[in-house]
Image (cartoon, rainbow, N blue to C red):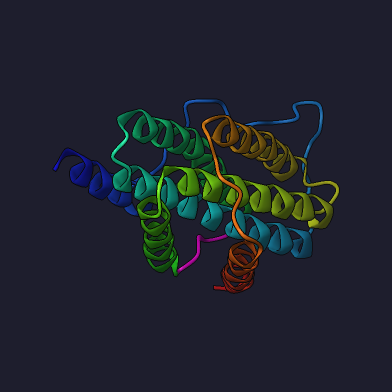
Amino acid sequence: MDHLIIAADAALRTLFARPRAARPCPTLPEQSTALSATEKALSGALMRVNHVGEVCAQALYTGQAFATKNEALHDHFMRASTEETDHLAWTSQRLDELGARPSLLNPLWYAGAFGLGLLAGRLGDRISLGFVVETENQVEAHLQSHMSRLPSNDHASRAIVSQMQDDEARHAVDARRAGAQELPAPAKALMRAAAKVMTTVAQRV
């Protein structure tokens, strides 16, 4: 029952509350950001996708924490979720600064990601951790692609994305150390396809 309450609270906070970061938002103080209307629109679209990714991260980790019967692993997933809250807060703040809105489909993204996390958790702890590794690897590659697409003078967004990359790589390493099992190639391909749909739609809606 406690885990159910925690899962419900996490969903409500992610979707309806203003996220609060434990760490300051990454910045490049010596660099000022001045964007044209076109550059602002591009940055806003890309940061909306990144914000959706963080909504999904909250859901995935919460679903996996709910599914495991291993209390130590439950705590591992919840700590990762807390760290991802920083990313959620930073991307939300940056969307505001760019005059862009979050995805209108965030409740749908959250529900789908929670279901995936729950399924991964039901398949066993090592598979669940393997799911984390593959997810974080794909997210890290996705963020790298955004670094090449963001306007070169959007220093504020680029600082956030760079820090997110570092954190996602660390989460993958932590999951490997905790005993992650390598996922089969078809599962990885299916995850990439689902991520492609999400990122394409979220950039616009």
Q: Position of residue 30 (x, y in %)?
A: 81, 26
Foreground: 93 or 126? 126
Residue located at (61% from left, 59% from top): 184
> Magenta region's main secondary structure?
loop
Identified at 36% across, 30% down, the residue is: 75
Residue 88 as seen in the image, left or right of residue 193: left
How many numbered discs, if any? Answer: 0
Vertical comparison of 145 with 23: above or below: below
Is residue 18 placed above or below 119 in the rendered structure? above
Residue at 30%, 31% (x, y): give it.
71
Where's residue 60, x and y in %? Answer: 43, 51
Which residues lie in the magenta part? Answer: 100-104
Residue at the image position 69 percent from the left and 43 percent from the top: 161
List x then y, in percent, for residue 94.
60, 46
- On screen, residue 19 versus residue 3, left or right, reads right
Can residue 9 be seen at all in this image of the molecule? yes
Q: Is residue 99 visible?
A: no
Residue 145 forms part of the magenta stretch: no
Give whichever of 161, 6 is nearer the camera.
6
User: Which quadrant is the N terminus positioned in?
Assistant: top left
Q: Quadrant of residue 168?
A: top right
Compared across the picture, whether 7 is left or right of 134 comes to left
Image vertical order of residue 134 relative to residue 205, above or below: above
Extreme-left residue of the structure: 1
In x, y percent, where is residue 148?
A: 84, 53
Q: Is-magenta flag for residue 103?
A: yes
Q: Nearer the viewer, residue 150 or 201?
A: 201
